[in-house]
């Protein structure tokens, strides 16, 4: 009985988390389509060697702290910056990208984005 | 059968941009009437201004139409070779205007043009000509790096640069809007049209390079044009 309660509780927690991811991702998708998809592609496929794909989960995971900086400040000489994006919007976009195209990075919260941005070089 | 096709046209019209739907409607109507007469009776129009010239031949007055055509040009390509319109005389080509640092419409336009390129890679009858409107930054070596990264592996797709007068003047003759504008992302404003040009340097079609429907239309009309090309 106790195990059953724990199981049900954990299921409820999981679904709450995944609802939040879904909410963030839906917002992120719209932003992605406006600001990112022309270069990175509708399915994150990139374009040749011009614009990289966003399907490399191991890159995204190992560079997680830098992702917000890349989105906001761009990459010198290659990717243009997006200074107009608020941190919550970056959270939405990264949650979308991080959980689409074969990626499974979980939620990017606004707090995480702000922490990352504080550490941009 | 014809009635069903006309119903389809009005349904498709309601959610397209004005110019796209006009072109689509005209083409579909022509296609429908073409179907009615049997074999592929469709021929592409010649776009641009035309002039009627009257002359006397053997005592009779004959009126000729002079169609708009692309003027001679000489531009530097991605291999730093000066190419001219002569390179494109053997077949048809698709022209557009872009710049390598364009963050807005060019990636989508070039992505779509790449699909056409890949379909016709190795087919000498079809060439591609992308003009850079960033005469400051897009030197031949920049264009070369861009072409290679895009996935262009042969000389069927030429990327050219020239003086502002040369390139922007040509843009006018291709009926493409180009303008330096520091208030837009990238600093250059331009339209994303792809122009289909025949062996006589007449423009036979103009397609919004960012629109999938128009790209499909371009593919269809390109194969129609190729049938008329020697």
Image: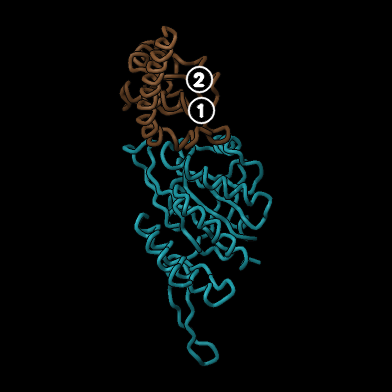
Chain colours: A brown, B cyan
In the rendered image, the quadrant that contains the C terminus of chain B is bottom right
Q: Secondary structure at mark 2?
A: helix
Q: Residues within 10 Å of mark 2 (few under 14, many from 20)?
A: some
Q: Nearer the viewer, residue B136 or A53?
A: A53
Residue at position x 54%, y 21% in the image: A57
Task: Check the residue under mark 1 and report the chain it is in.
Answer: A
Q: Compute the Cα span from label 1 to label 2.
A: 8 Å
Q: Residue furthest front?
A: A1
Residue at position x 60%, y 48% in the image: B117
Q: Are marks 1 and 2 on the same chain?
A: yes
Q: Nearer the viewer, residue B60 or A100?
A: A100
Q: What percent of the width, then of the height, locates residue B64? A: 49, 79
Q: Nearer the viewer, residue A91 or B218?
A: A91
Q: What percent of the width, then of the height, locates residue B106? A: 46, 42
Q: Does the residue at mark 1 contact the one at mark 2 (Cβ under 8 Å)?
A: yes
Task: Judge whether residue B104 can be spotted in this image.
Answer: yes
Q: What percent of the width, then of the height, locates residue B33? A: 49, 74
Q: Which residue is mark 2?
A: A60
Mark sitting earlier along the chain (1/2): 1
Residue B199 sits above or below residue B143 on the image = below
Residue at position x 46%, y 16% in the image: A64
Q: Nearer the viewer, residue A86 or B157?
A: A86
Q: Residues within 10 Å of mark 1 (few under 14, many from 20)?
A: many
Residue A65 sits above or below residue A20 on the image = above
Task: Check the residue under mark 2 and report the chain it is in.
Answer: A
Q: Quadrant of residue B94?
A: bottom right
Q: Residue furthest top?
A: A2
Residue at position x 49%, y 61% in the image: B205
Q: Which residue is mark 1?
A: A54
């Amino acid at each position: 009985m106790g195990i059953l309660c724990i199981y049900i509780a954990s299921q409820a927690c999981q679904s709450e988390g995944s609802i939040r991811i879904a909410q963030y991702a839906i917002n992120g998708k719209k932003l992605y389509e406006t600001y990112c998809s022309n270069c990175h592609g509708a399915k994150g496929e990139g374009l040749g060697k011009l614009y990289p794909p966003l399907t490399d989960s191991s890159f995204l995971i190992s560079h997680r702290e830098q992702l917000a900086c890349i989105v906001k400040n761009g990459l010198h000489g290659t990717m243009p910056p997006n200074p107009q994006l608020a941190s919550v919007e970056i959270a939405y976009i990264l949650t979308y990208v991080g959980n689409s195209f074969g990626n499974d990075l979980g939620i990017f919260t606004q707090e995480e984005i702000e922490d990352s941005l504080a550490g941009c070089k | 059968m014809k009635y069903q096709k006309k119903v389809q046209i009005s349904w498709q019209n309601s959610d397209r941009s004005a110019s796209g739907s006009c072109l689509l409607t005209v083409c579909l109507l022509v296609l429908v009437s073409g179907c009615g007469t049997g074999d592929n009776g469709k021929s592409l129009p010649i776009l641009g201004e035309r002039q009627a010239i009257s002359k006397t031949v053997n005592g009779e007055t004959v009126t000729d139409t002079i169609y708009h055509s692309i003027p001679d040009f000489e531009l530097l390509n991605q291999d730093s070779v000066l190419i001219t319109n002569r390179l494109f005389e053997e077949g048809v080509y698709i022209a557009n205007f872009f710049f390598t640092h364009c963050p807005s419409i060019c990636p989508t336009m070039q992505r779509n043009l790449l699909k056409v390129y890949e379909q016709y890679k190795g087919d000498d009858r079809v060439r591609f000509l992308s003009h850079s409107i960033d005469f400051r930054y897009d030197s031949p070596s920049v264009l070369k790096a861009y072409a290679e990264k895009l996935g262009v592996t042969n000389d069927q797709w030429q990327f050219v640069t020239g003086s502002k007068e040369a390139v922007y003047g040509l843009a006018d003759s291709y009926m493409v809007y180009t303008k330096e504008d520091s208030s837009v992302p990238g600093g250059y404003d331009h339209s994303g049209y792809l122009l289909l040009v025949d062996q006589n340097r007449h423009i036979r079609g103009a397609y919004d390079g960012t629109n999938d429907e128009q790209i499909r239309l371009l593919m269809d009309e390109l194969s129609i044009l190729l049938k008329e090309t020697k």
